[in-house]
Amino acid sequence: MKDQKIPNFDLEEMKTKGQQYFNKMRKGYLERDYQQLTERELFPPSFKIVDSI
């Protein structure tokens, strides 16, 4: 690590790949859910949703 960066490591590429993997896993859960819950029911938010003013 140098200047708080890892040489030869593309953080944006890693974020993109991570998001793609997450989306694939999420889709798989929805497809295999025997109760056929909605996405909102199966993956409730972790934090309270606050309406913007």
Image (spheres, rainbow, N blue to C red):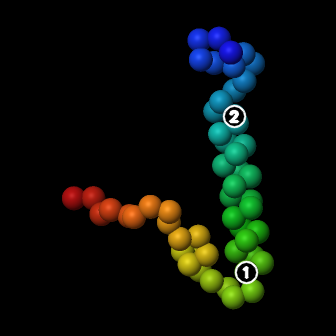
Q: Residue furthest left?
A: 53
Looking at the image, is 7 positioned above or below residue 41? above
Looking at the image, is 11 positioned above or below residue 23? above
Query: Quadrant of the image for the N terminus?
Result: top right
Q: What residue lies at 56% left-to-right and 78% top-to-bottom?
A: 41
The numbered disc on residue 25 is: none
Q: Is residue 33 left or right of residue 49?
A: right
Q: Is residue 49 left or right of residue 23?
A: left
Between 51 and 3, the one lying in front of the other is 3
Quadrant in the picture for residue 26: bottom right
Q: What residue lies at 50% left-to-right and 63% top-to-bottom?
A: 46
Label 1: which secondary element: loop
Q: Is residue 47 left or right of residue 37?
A: left
Mark-to-mark CA distance, 2 and 1: 31 Å
Q: Is residue 43 left or right of residue 18?
A: left
Between 27 and 45, the one lying in front of the other is 45
Rendering coords of residue 27 (x, y %): 71, 67
Q: What residue lies at 61% left-to-right and 75% top-to-bottom?
A: 42
Q: Nearer the viewer, mark 2 or mark 1?
A: 1
Between 4 and 12, the one lying in front of the other is 4
Mark 1 lies on residue: 33
Circle 1: residue type: Asp
Q: Residues within 10 Å of mark 1 (few under 14, many from 20)?
A: few
Earlier in the chain: of badge 2 and badge 1, it is 2
Mark 2 lies on residue: 13
Label 2: which secondary element: helix
Rendering coords of residue 5 (x, y %): 63, 18
Circle 2: residue type: Glu
Q: Residue furthest top?
A: 2
